Amino acid sequence: MPSSIFQKQAAKKDVFQIFAEKVRDHKNLESRWAVLQETRVEYFRGKDFVSFLRNHPDLKNILESDRNLEIEDIGDILLRKNLIVRCDRVVKTLRPGKKKLSTWPAHLELFSEQVFSDNDAFFAWTFVNRWPLWQTLLSFFWPVLTIAICLFPVYPHRCKLFILYFCAGLLLLILTLLLLRAFVFGSLWILLGKRVWIFPNILAEEATLKELFQFWPKKDEDERPKWTARLFYTIVAVVVILLLRHHAPDEAARARYQKRVSNIIDDVLEWSPSLALSGMMEKQTVFNATDPDSNVADGSKTTTEQTAQPEDVEGDIITVEHEVEQPIENSEDTDHQ
């Protein structure tokens, strides 16, 4: 009897574990990432959990005998089994210029009462989610991509050109998109006092593919900025633009920079293992062209000449002395005569 009871309890625990994994992996349950006690966790709101189970009652069939439980009771069981933990926002006061608290806070702390509620309550998953198949394949793909990047110098010339233009085009697209976002935001903020970021999730750390390319942002709920602040930043923007225009490089400087960059790119594109090996062989041939025996003979010759050089100098000095003495003797003979 006791063993059968333990088996039933284990089965029930496995059932709720499977239920929690299914709910967490479901795309319709909105969740975010936050920092809880210096640890990044994925969390959801209590009201979203309630509405999610009401819209998807078929998921409760996973619980088998407990599928008729109320949603609040299911949440309490998940809390008791430590599959989720209730959290609270760290910042509980309104910031200046804000009308209400953040919908999805970035920093959380543990709540004192671990009871399920749908009234401004947050719940974080405590178990490590299993990786899907695409993440496993991606983990094997990254080392292959790293090796492929390292082997870029040995690629054919056409392949190098394709990679170069593709990366340059992608970088240009990203920079253009960021500049366009900044221009639209600054223009609407200065002219209308509205905070509008197109593609609001393009720089988000955690976002789905659909959220990443969401074009229009949500409604601006912040207080409208004062006209003095808008006027001040307008003057700052005009001054910055004038300074950049005044210190912009001339045509000659741009041409020199373009030539320098093009030379660097050409060196990278034209490099190949055959050219590198041929250059190494030429250096080896030049090095081997000098005979070691002749080098030794030349060295001995040089040493002999260096040692013999002082004797020659002394000989020259003696010859000079004789030449000097001879005119003196001749002059003495002339006087005697």
Image: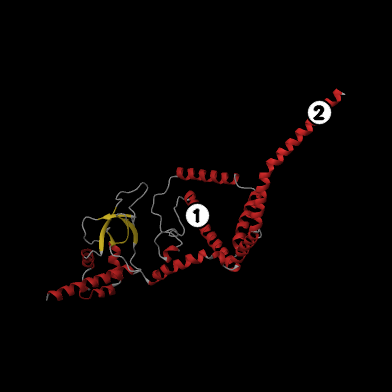
304 left or right of 141 in image: right
Q: Earlier in the sequence, mark 1 or mark 2?
A: 1
Mark toward the viewer: 1 or 2? 2
Q: Write the residue at 12% across / 74% down.
A: 2
Where does label 1 land, which residue? 184
On-image quarter of the C terminus: top right
What percent of the width, then of the height, locates residue 218? 41, 59
On-image quarter of the N terminus: bottom left
Where does label 2 land, which residue? 329
Amino acid, disc 1 = Val
Residue 263's image quarter? bottom right
133 left or right of 86 in image: right
Q: CA distance from mark 1 to mark 2?
A: 109 Å
Camera sees residue 68: no
Amino acid, disc 2 = Glu
Q: Judge by depth and name the residue closer to the eye, 324 or 191.
A: 324
Q: Write the residue at 57% across / 46% down.
A: 244
Camera sees residue 171: yes
What percent of the width, then of the height, locates residue 161? 59, 65
Q: Write the residue at 50% across / 51% down.
A: 187
In the image, residue 69 above or below residue 229: below
Model colouring? secondary structure
236 left or right of 123 in image: right
